[in-house]
Amino acid sequence: MEILLIAIALAGGSAVGYGTKSYLFKKKKDSAQARADKLLEDTKAKAKEQLLAAKEEAIEMIDETKTEEKKRREQLSGQEKRLAEREINLDAKFNRLDERTEAQKSNEKEIDEIKEELKEIRTRQQKNLEKIAKLNKKEAADKLMQMTEKDIKADLVKLVEKLQRDAKENADDIARGIVSDAMQRIASEQTSERTVTTVAIPNDELKGRIIGKEGRNIQTIERLTGVDVIIDETPGVIVLSGFDPVRRQVARVALENLIKDGRIHPTKIEETVQKAQKEIDQIIKKAGEEACHETGVAGLPPEIVNYLGQLKFRTSYGQNVLKHSIEMTHLAVIIASEIGANVAVCRTAALLHDLGKAVTHEMDGNHHHLTRTLLEKAGVDEAIIHAAEAHHDDIEATTVEALVVRAVDAVSASRPGARGDNVENYAKRMTDLENLTNSFTGVEKSYAISAGREIRVFVKPESIDDLTAIKLARDISNKIEATLKYPGTIKVNVIRETRAIEYAK
């Protein structure tokens, strides 16, 4: 019974709970539906407002576009009107130009007719004058020139002398000032020309070790370096002989290192020569770079810098070629600045003018022609190439820069002590200068003085007059320039004198 009551109670409680849940669920459902309906209405209201705002904005944009389009149409209309007016003005100008052209053609035709008329009148007058004077035009001109020359010959000689004197004084003063100023700012030391290098040894016992068994050591050195190793009875030295100065330097460094090391055999010699070659290559590279830095020349290709560095070991007539090139560069820059030439071209051309001397032992040809070949291969500017190549007289100098390089080359080479010269060459130069001068007609005798810097020419007064003496001096100087090849300036002094001698008894 109790169990039944409990079961009934449970059943009743379940029924009540289910009913309660059903009621609450229905109530929540109705509330959610109400909120959803309200949210939907709010959304629709906002959408309507946004749509109205968008429509209003679109209407405003359309109105602005129409206004802007109207303005542009008005501007285009104004431009069209202005273009039409300009076209009308251009047509009018073209018409006036055509009228002027026609008028000019008519005037030119009239001028041509007048010229022809004047030519005919001049021809008739010339014929009439020839009939009256019984001389043609050329004969009359020759006779007039003869009479004029005869009348003013003395005055002409004085005038020519004065003009030459004034021009020479002014030119000499200007040139002397420029060159002396440039030379005062340049100072360089000189070395003597040589084709041998001596290596000092501590004792003569090393000579046998350097020669080696059956001469294997000395043969290895000569084969690897390309120079002759001369070992004679001269105490304390070994002589290296060779035309290529770079190879001599490699041999010298290698031999000195072998002497310091003490181990002298073919394998060690080969290793030492390779190290010496690398050391000399570094010296060459550094010398080229230092020369470019000292002279202010930048942007040269590496191979040109290397050739330039090789000139450190080259000499010409007792003058170190690299130092000569650097000195020339400084002189060229100073002179080019004074006369208004291209300083950059003069600077580079002066530094590279003797570049071909670095390869004269490897390639055939004159060094200045080899310079052109090397610079052309490196893509150097033609103005620089011409200025560098034309420093010798067989190439015509067609630019101011080429003349500057030629002048400073002569200045650097002709300074006292710059280059060595033996007695035979000096005597031959004096003889050639006098023989050349004596070959001219009317020259009685000539003397080369001042170490060949002046030639005094005595002429026969009955054969050479004053005016001809001036021309003779110019002809002699031109022939010296074209024939004799050595640096410097030669003064040609033509002397004409008449002596009247009587004896009182």
Image: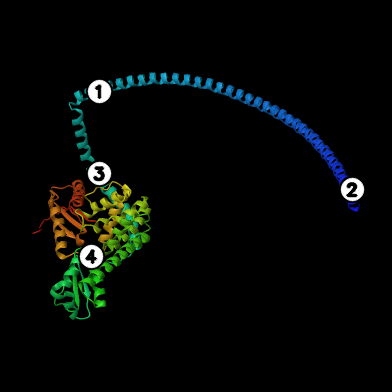
Within 10 Å of disc 2 (Cα), the crowding (few <14, some 14-19, many 20+) is few
Counting residues from the start of the chain, the first of labels 3 and 4 encountered is 3
Residue located beneath label 2 in the image? 8
**Which element is circle 2 on?**
helix
Question: What's the CA distance linking mark 2 and mark 1?
Answer: 164 Å
Question: What's the CA distance linking mark 3 and mark 4?
Answer: 64 Å
Residue located beneath label 4 in the image? 247
What is the three-letter code of the residue carrying label 1?
A: Thr
Question: What's the CA distance linking mark 1 and mark 4?
Answer: 80 Å
Within 10 Å of disc 4 (Cα), the crowding (few <14, some 14-19, many 20+) is many
Give the residue at x 63% y 24%. 73
Image coordinates for residue 88, horizontal then vertical, percent: 53, 20
Residue located beneath label 3 in the image? 156
What is the three-letter code of the residue carrying label 4?
A: Arg
Pick whichever, 155 or 456, lies toward us.
456
Within 10 Å of disc 1 (Cα), the crowding (few <14, some 14-19, many 20+) is few
Image coordinates for residue 438, horizontal then vertical, percent: 13, 53
The quarter of the picture where residue 51 lies is: top right
Residue located beneath label 1 in the image? 123
Disc 1 vs disc 4: which is toward the camera? 4
**Which element is circle 4 on?**
helix
